[in-house]
Amino acid sequence: MSGHSKWSTIKRKKAVTDAKRGQVFTRLAREIAIAAREGGGNPDSNFTLRVAVEKARAESMPAANIERAIQRGTGEGKDATAIEQITYEGYAPHGVALIIDCVTDNRNRTVSELRHVLTRSGGSLGETGSVGWQFTQVAFFAFPAGEHSEEQLFELAAEAGADDVWVEDGQAEITGPVAAFKQIGDALRNAGIGIADAGLRMQPNQEVDLEPAETIQVMRTIEALEDLDDVQKVASNLNISDAALEQLASA
C-alpha cells in the first residue's frame, strides 16, 4: 500500500475527539450540500450524496443535520446559495506541491487562513495551474477488506473498470478513472462491501522523496491545513515513507 494510503488509513482509524466533533460535522455537512447541489437531493439516484450521507451517519451526525445539509444544497435551505467549492494550489515546505479543496461562504477568509498556515510553515499559495499539471484526478474507495482476499477484490475492481487495488492490515483501497466512479461503487455494494470513504481526489503523477524529518514537517503542514474549517481535503505529491510513519507514530 502506498504511503498516502497508509496515512489515510491511520487518520481514519483515529478516534474523533469531542472537541473536533463540531468541526467534523461542519465539514460533512458541506460535503453533503455540495453533492446534493451537483447531483440532486435523492441519495438513491445520487451516488456521491449517498456516500457522503453514509460517512455522516458513521460519525453519528444527527439525521436533522443531514437533512438540512441536503436542503441547503438543493436550494431549499435559507442559505442555499451561500457556499461554493474552490480549489487552491500551492507549496508546502521543501517544494512539495499541494492541491487544496475548499468549501466556503467567504473567499477572503479562506485565502487568508490558507496563506497564514502555509507562510508560517515555509510554504506559499500559488497561481491556478501552478501545480495542477502534476496531478491526475481519480476515483477512490476505502473500506475494510473483511473476508475478501486481495485476489477477489482485484477481480471485482478490474471488472468494474478500476485501475489499482491495495490491501494491508485488513484495510483496502481501490482507485480508478473518474468515469468509473459509480460503476465501481455499485460493484462494491453488490458484493456486500460497506464503503468507509469514497470520492474523487487528485493523485500525483510522480512523488517527491524527502528525509523522514522533512516528510513529517510537510505532513504537519497538511494537517494544519486540514484542520481549517473551510478545507475539505488536501492532496500532495509527497511520498510518505515507512520511516516517516514510524517516527510519527512514536512521537
Image (spheres, rainbow, N blue to C red):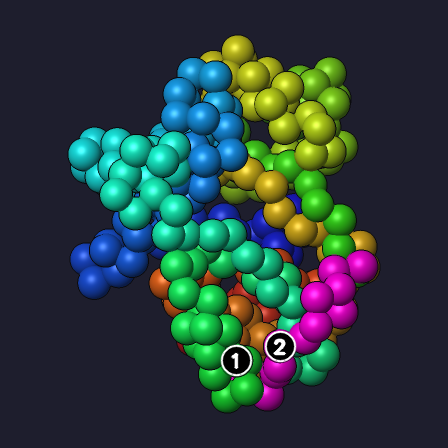
Q: Which part of the image, by quadrant, shows the C terminus?
A: bottom left
Provide the secondary structure element on which disc 2 rests. Answer: strand
115 up-or-down from 227: above or below = below
> Whole-percent x and y of residue 174?
63, 34
Name the residue carrying label 2. Answer: 125
Specify the amino acid type for callout 2.
Answer: Leu
Which of 16 and 46 lies nearest the eye of the viewer? 46
Which of 101 and 207 lies nearest the eye of the viewer? 101
Is residue 196 inside the magenta stretch?
no
Is residue 127 inside the magenta stretch?
yes
Q: Which residues are magenta?
A: 121-133
> Whole-percent x and y of residue 232?
46, 55
Horizontal side, residue 180 vs residue 111: left or right: right
> Whole-percent x and y of residue 29?
33, 44
Residue at image location 59% in from the left, 58% down from the top: 87
Provide the secondary structure element on which disc 1 rests. Answer: helix
Q: Residue furthest top?
A: 190
Residue at image location 56% in from the left, 17% down from the top: 186
Question: Mark 2 and 1 residues: CB-CB less than 8 Å, in contact?
Answer: yes
Count residues near mark 2 (Cα–Cα under 10 Å), then give few for <14, some for 14-19, many for 20+.
Answer: many
Label 2, label 1: how many angstroms apart (C-alpha)?
A: 6 Å
Specify the amino acid type for callout 1.
Answer: Arg
